[in-house]
Each structure stands twice: as C-alpha cells, then as structure tokens.
Image: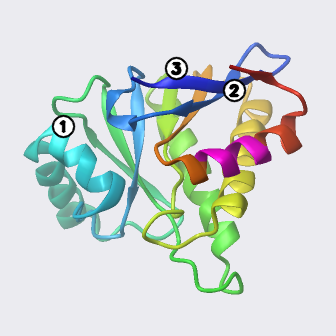
Amino acid sequence: MNVVKAEHALTSGRVIRLVQGDITEERVDAIVNAANSHLQHGGGVAAAIVRKGGAVIQQESEAWVRQHGPVPTGRAAITSAGALPCRAVIHAVGPIWRGGHAGEEEQLRSAALSSFALASDRGFVSLALPAISAGIFGFPADRCAAILLTAARDFLREHPESSLREIRFVLFDPPTLEAFLQAFHRIFGPAAEF
C-alpha cells in the first residue's frame, strides 16, 4: 500500500507530495515512466509498468517510435495506460549518468518539465513520477531528488494556467526515498511529514 511521507502546498493551493510505494498502484491521471529513447520497457520501473499495465503499453510505445523516431534524452512521449489505474503513461527519457559533466542535470530537468507540459496539455490534474534516471541509469539519488523537486515547484509556479494541481514522486526503495525526503526538507523547509 502506498503511503504519503511528506507534502508541501504552494500558495496557489497546488501540492507536491512524496509517496513511498509502487507507482503502478497510483490513482492519478497519469504516471511517468523512466524510459529509454527507443521505449523498450525491459527493466526497472518500465518493466513493472508493462507487466501491470499489459502489452498494449509496449505495443503503443513501439508504434510511437515508428511514427516519430526515438525520443530524445530530456523529452517525453505518451501512451495509454492499459490496465493501470490511471489514464495515461508519459514516457520520460532521462539521461544516463556519465559523471555530471555531459549536461545530465539539464537533461533530467528537461525530462521532468517535458512530462509536466505533456500532462498539462492533456488537461491532467494529477501526475506521479518515479526517480527518473536514479535507477539503472545511475544518476545520484540526492542530485536527482533536488532537480526533480525544484523542477516541479518551478513548473507549478511559472504555469498558473496549467491544469496540474498535484505532482507526486513515488519512490519504492528506502535509500531513494530518504534522499528525496532530505532534498524535500532542504527545498521546502519543515513541510508536513507523515
């Protein structure tokens, strides 16, 4: 069962939450998949999403790549959600960590902002994201957390017209959750913790 661990309400009433649990169980308008450029969902969060959502997600992903070409790092694509309890899956392509000198931080921020913009374009109100690039792509969890949390805050502040009202970061493993909690408190101060 997914559990809210911390939340921060912006002055606009929009909310950023940290949730410990399984992103495939989130009841939101859309979830974000940490994807590769070819949208081949063979490992990590991507494999879990296809396993629970069904083969239609992989089939639609392959059709997307055939039509548009590979998704550039820092961008996102969208498919249906199959059997998942959400309306869509946004496939964000984060960077592979190469030591921090190859533009990885900017690419990660871009992947998050692309996801928020795509969700907003579809009129979605709630969105759940994993720790994009922090798994098999090797991005350090503490830096990932700081980038993703500030990107969410900045997007919600800078786009008052956006339909997005809630952005959740859903973290499965305790070390990544701890990194996000520490970054959350640095960025938002003593936010409500559960």
Q: Is residue 140 left or right of residue 29?
A: right
Q: How far from the left and from the top, in percent, is residue 189?
A: 90, 33
Q: Earlier in the sequence, mark 2 or mark 1?
A: 2
Q: Quadrant of the N terminus?
A: top left
**Label 3 secondary element:** loop
Q: How far from the left and from the top, in percent, is residue 161?
A: 68, 23
Q: Is residue 182 magenta?
A: yes
Q: Is residue 190 magenta?
A: no
Q: Which residue is mark 1?
A: 53
Going by the numbered disc 3, the residue's amino acid type is: Val
Q: Which residue is mark 3?
A: 125
**Label 1 secondary element:** helix
Going by the numbered disc 2, the residue's amino acid type is: Ala
Q: CA distance from mark 2 to mark 1?
A: 27 Å
Q: Earlier in the sequence, mark 1 or mark 3?
A: 1
Which residue lies at the image location 69% right of the left edge and 68% below the top edge? 106
User: Which quadrant of the figure has residue 167?
Assistant: top right
Which residue lies at the image location 50% right of the left edge and 30% below the top edge? 127
Segment tinted magenta in the rendering: 177-183
Q: Quadrant of the C terminus?
A: top right
Q: Is residue 185 left or right of residue 155?
A: right
Q: Residue 6 bears which disc, if any?
A: 2
Which residue lies at the image location 42% right of the left edge and 22% below the top edge? 28
159 or 51: which is nearer to us? 51
Mark 1 Cα-neighbour bin, 10 Å: few <14, some 14–19, many ≥20: many
